[in-house]
Amino acid sequence: MPEVTVQKWEESERHWGTRPDGYSLHLNDSDRKNFIEEYWKRMPNSTPSEYSRPDGTAYIASVDGETYKKVKASKNGIRCFDRPPGSGGTDGWMY
């Protein structure tokens, strides 16, 4: 099975706190970093009432061929909102 880099995300909402907010899949760590950089460039200059941010340390996981094709066809990765593949990493939530 092909492998990808997984980055979990967390949502922060003013007056409510934080909660898991899916994950992103990337072909490699460079794509992961570019994906995150592009995300922050789209954010406003002031902190919004609700936003997502990377959470925890990225990790490597195996995915099925169809998922790998989607990641490969994307610019730097894709966001997903179901259960993350693999172990879930060493330092964060799992669905």
Image (tube, grey):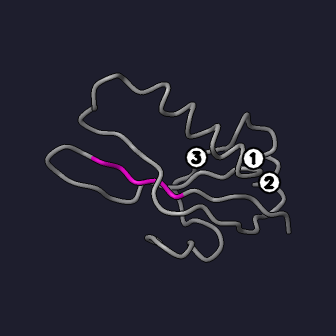
Residue 91 placed where, x, y %?
48, 73
**What residue did someone put label 2 on?**
68
Secondary structure, mark 1, is: helix
**What residue did someone put label 3 on?**
79
Residue 58 placed where, x, y %?
60, 61
Residues under numbered marks 1 and 3 in contact, where contact means CB atoms less than 8 Å apart? no
Q: Residue at x 54, y 63 (%)?
A: 57
Q: CA distance from mark 2 to mark 1?
A: 5 Å
Residues under numbered marks 2 and 3 in contact, where contact means CB atoms less than 8 Å apart? no
Q: CA distance from mark 1 to mark 3?
A: 9 Å
Residue 45 or 4: which is nearer the viewer?
A: 45
Dot 1 amino acid type? Val
Which quarter of the rendered picture does the N terminus lie within?
Answer: bottom right
Dot 2 amino acid type? Tyr
Tell whether 16 sits left or right of 43. left
Q: Residue at x 35, y 40 (%)?
A: 51
In this view, 3 is above or below 88:
above
Dot 3 amino acid type? Arg
Residues under numbered marks 2 and 1 in contact, where contact means CB atoms less than 8 Å apart? yes
Q: Which residue, as the protein is rendered here, is positioned at the far left?
A: 15
Residue 62 placed where, x, y %?
76, 68
Bounds of the magenta segment: 8-12
Secondary structure, mark 3, is: strand
Question: Which of pointers 1 and 3 lies earlier in the amino acid sequence?
Answer: 1
Question: Which of pointers 2 and 3 lies earlier in the amino acid sequence?
Answer: 2
Other residues around mark 3 within 10 Å, as few (<14) / some (14–19) / many (≥20)? some
**What residue did someone put label 1 on?**
71
Q: Residue at x 75, y 59 (%)?
A: 4
Q: CA distance from mark 2 to mark 3?
A: 13 Å
